[in-house]
Amino acid sequence: MRARLARQSIVVVGAAIVLVGWLARPRAQPAGDAAAPLVYAPGPEVEGAAERGKVDTAAALKLARKKQYVEAVAILERVALAHPSVVHDCNLSLAYLRAGQLTRAQLVWDVSRLRGATPPDWCDASLSGQLATALRAKTYVPLTINVQPQGALIEVNGVSLRDMSLVWLPPATYQIRVTHAGWHPQLQPVLVAPPSASASILLVQLGDPTIERDAAVATPDAGVAASSADAGVAADVDAATDVDFEPPPPPPAARAKWPAYAGIGAAGLGLGLGVAFHARALGTKDRANMLPTDSMGFRDAKDRFGTERTLAIGGYVVSAAAIGFTTWWLLGKDQGEPPATTRTVGLEPRGDGAVLTFGGTLR
C-alpha cells in the first residue's frame, strides 16, 4: 500500500512540475505595431551575422509554415537585433507581412535596402510588390517626418525609428514624440490622410542661451499633457521651437458614377432604336419603289418612310449625345461638380442625316 501511495505521489508531483513549467513558459508578444521593442534604423551588415542566426531563423520559419506568425515574429526580432543582416531583415519583413503588421514590415524592408549587402532574390521585387499591394489594400498613407538634429529617436503609433523619415500608417491623427540626449523633447500631432502626410520637427538644445521664451505664449497645461499619448514629454518646450501644424487638405470627393451608367444605357437604347427604325425605313423604301408613284400605296409608304427615317436619326442622335456625355463625365475631375466651365451642344440637319457637335472648356 505504501509503495502504491509513493508511486501516486511521484506522479502527482511530476504532473505539477510539468504544469508549472508550462504556465511559466515564455510567451510571444501579441500581434500589432506596438509588440516589438526594436528601433528601426539603418546600419551596416555585421560579418557572419547571417550564419550565426541560422538555427533560430530555421525555427522561426518552421513556426511560420504552421501559420504561427506571432511566435515566428518574436524569434526573428531577436535574431535581427542580435545579428544585423539583410537576410534577417527580409525574413522579419515577410513575417511581419504575414502577421498583418504592415507598418513594421515596410520599415524593416527599407532597413534591408540600407544594409549595403545583396538581399535574397525573393526579397527584392517579389516582397516589395507584396508589401505595396497590402498597403494599398489597407489604405495606408505614407508619412514623411523631417527631424533636426539627426540621430533623434522618433516614436509614432508604437513604432520607434531613427535616421529614417518615411513610415506608412493607417489614416488617423497621431502624436509624434521626438527625443534626443541633450535636447528638449518634442510632441507634435499630425493628421495622416490620403494621399500623403508630412511633419517637420525642430528640437532645441538644452541650456541654449540664444533661445528666449516668448512670454506671450502660454505653457501647455500639465493636465492636458498628462492625458496626451505620452505624458513624459515636457510641456515647457520653448515657443520658438513650435512648428506650425497645417493638416493636409481632405481628399476630393469622388464623383458619382450613376450618371455615367445612365449615359451608357441611353446610348445603347438610342442606338438600338436607330438601327431598328433604320432597317424598317429601308424596307419601306424598297416596297415603295415597287409601287407606281401616283398610287395611294406609294404615298402612304413614302409617309411611313419619312417617319421611320426621322425616328432612326433621332435614335442615333440620342446615342451620340449619351456617348458624348458619358465620355465628358468620366474624363472630368473628381471634384463633386461638373468639370467644364463652359459647354455647348449643336445639332445641324444635313440632307438625310444630321451632325452633332460638342464643345466645352475643362478645368
Image (tube, rainbow, N blue to C red):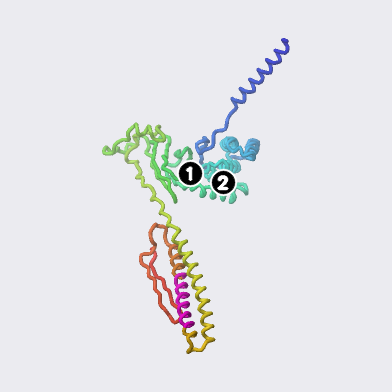
Rounded to the nearest angstrom, the CA distance separating label 1 from label 2 is: 16 Å
**Foreground of the two, 39 or 24:** 24
The relative height of residue 233 versus residue 287 in the rendered view (above or below) is above
- Pointer 2 residue: 116
Q: Is mark 2 on a helix, strand or loop?
A: loop
Three-letter amino acid code of the residue under disc 2 = Gly
Residue 51 in view here: no
Q: In which quarter of the image is residue 80?
A: top right
**Foreground of the two, 167 or 223:** 223
Name the residue: 43% across, 74% down: 356
Where residue 54 appears, x then y in whole percent?
Answer: 65, 38
> From the viewer's perspective, is the residue at label 1 or at label 2 nearer?
1
Three-letter amino acid code of the residue under disc 1 = Met
The relative height of residue 234 versus residue 10 in the rendered view (above or below) is below
Query: Is 352 positioned to the left or the right of 100 in the image?
Result: left
> Which residues are the magenta region?
300-319
Q: Is mark 1 on a helix, strand or loop?
A: loop
**Closer to the N terminus: mark 1 or mark 2?**
2
Residue situated furthest front in the rendering: 296
Where residue 58 appears, x then y in whole percent?
Answer: 65, 38
**Foreground of the two, 204 or 279:** 279
- Pointer 1 residue: 164
Where residue 192 appears, x then y in whole percent?
Answer: 43, 46
Query: Is 344 positioned to the left or the right of 57 in the image?
Result: left
Where residue 208 appears, x then y in whole percent?
Answer: 34, 36
Name the residue: 37% across, 37% down: 205
Query: Badge 1: few (under 14), some or many (20 or more) residues near its Cα, within 10 Å?
Result: many
Which disc number belongs to residue 40? none
Name the residue: 58% across, 51% down: 125
